[in-house]
Amino acid sequence: MKAIVKPTSQLQGEINALSSKNYTTRYLLIGALADGTSTIYYPAHSEDSDAMRRCVRDLGAIIEEDDEKIVITGFGKNPKHVSELNVGNAGAVLRFLMSTAAFCPDVTFVNTYPESLGKRPHDDLIDTLQQMGVEVQHSNGRLPITIKGGQPRGGKLTVSGNVSSQFLSSLLFMTPLLEEDSEIEVLHDLKSKIIVGQTLEVLAQAGIIVHASEDLMHYRIPGGQSYQAKEYVIQGDYPGSAAILAAAAVTNSDVRVLRLEENSKQGEKACVDVLRAMGVNLTHEDGVVHVRGNQKLIAGEFDGDHFTDAVLAMVAAAVFAEGTSRFYNVENLRYKECDRITDYLNELRKAGADVEERQSEIIVHGKPQGVTGGVEINAHFDHRVIMALTVVGLRSEKGLIIRDAHHVAKSYPQYFDHLRSIGAQVELVNE
Ligand SMILES: O=C(O)C1=C[C@@H](OP(=O)(O)O)[C@@H](O)[C@H](O)C1
Ligand SMILES: C=C(OP(=O)(O)O)C(=O)O
């Protein structure tokens, strides 16, 4: 599918935020790891959340669903001995389930996105699984990956955190089910640290005890625990909504996004502060972010690791700011669906933006007068590139054509419908 994004100067209306992808994957997992029946209200419906649903079902969870909820009966620590799992292009789903798969004798995670997830490294988690006595076959740390588990061991474990926090989260979900206690030391650095808070939050809700050090670099996890079956309610999704808010920020707008909790643990809620720091006129009260954009933004400097999945949308807003913006501490964006520094900036340049890259920084020389556009954009299999380039297209002189825009469905299938409902001129054409 091709998205033809036409210049649009005005956006107006109200959007109900999509449901959080990262909470949906977590609650599906802990529902599957519980012995009883849990209920998840308002789950996300996207390729990534569907991938988790499909895989836990393959592993033996029983799932019933209707329009508002999923009812899931888990398999505890006794998943079905499947031979193959397909996580699609979902990094978190793969990494979370690699540890769960250690309870199975022989499971292969297949490589269905060789150009995207197939290029992402998983060595750090493979190392830890090997410390636990699990045999892992892999191609240079990448898919396809075969886990030959059975009886993984706890004890003293280390995991590197400087590529992804998902490896640590994965171990935090699985180690409470081991017979013996575990101690996890995070080596090097811990990127996307803030999202580990979401993992600890849902573990506590399921009655799991984890002793975490204040800096989130050391953990003591008592073994022999079991997940309680509970009821969970999914909140609105900040990473996806960040793109809607950025679109409102770069146009003349009066846009309200509902269901965005002020006290959420999602790091990407910082996008509200980033836009405010850029001079955007907005309020955030009672779960509603209300943007009244006037196309005027000012540049700023931001630690992007605090809002990793919203960085691309914030960079898109900075393209139109007065002055030079700097997003630092973002090296791990290179290990996502595409290289979100080099690949993304190449597409931004095609659209007419003035951007520079460093190994762990994105620098944007703003163009308040707008960019020319009028070119075709390569999506690089990346939903966040698609969403961010759409924002740029709306404020361009000649619009943008985004190829392979259907990949937006990885996290936000209704993105273009939502944008059109507030007045964005976007045409979708089957290629
Ligand atoms: O734990 C999670 O659900 C996620 C962690 C983050 O990844 P990294 O830790 O690799 O940055 C984030 O980018 C991803 O979308 C979801
Ligand atoms: C990086 C992302 O997801 P994942 O790592 O789960 O593929 C994302 O949603 O932006």
Image (cartoon, rainbow, N blue to C red):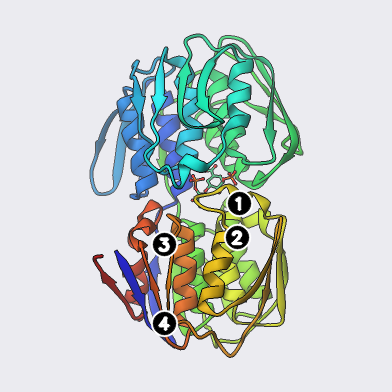
* Residue occupying the far bottom of the picture: 369
Label 3 vs label 4, nearer the camera: 4
Q: Name the element at disc 1.
A: helix
Look at 34% across and 24% down and name the residue there: 84
Determine the image quadrant of residue 86: top left
* Whether label 1 touches label 2, CB < 8 Å: yes
Determine the image quadrant of residue 221: top right
Distance, label 4 to label 1, CA atoms, is 27 Å
- Percent position of residue 205, x then y: 52, 34
Q: Quadrant of the C terminus?
A: bottom left
Amino acid type, callout 4: Gly
Amino acid type, callout 2: Thr
Q: Name the element at disc 2.
A: helix
Look at 53% across and 41% down and name the residue there: 120
Ligand 1 location (quadrant):
top right
Q: Earlier in the sequence, mark 4 or mark 1?
A: 1
Label 3 vs label 1, nearer the camera: 1
Query: Residue 342: which numbered mark, if any?
Result: 2
**Front-most of residues 253 and 9:** 9
**Crowd around label 3: few <14 · some 14–19 · many ≥20 (10 Å):** many
**Crowd around label 2: few <14 · some 14–19 · many ≥20 (10 Å):** some
Q: Name the element at disc 4.
A: loop
- Regarding residue 61, the answer to whether it shows in the image is no
Residue that numbered label 3 is attached to:
17
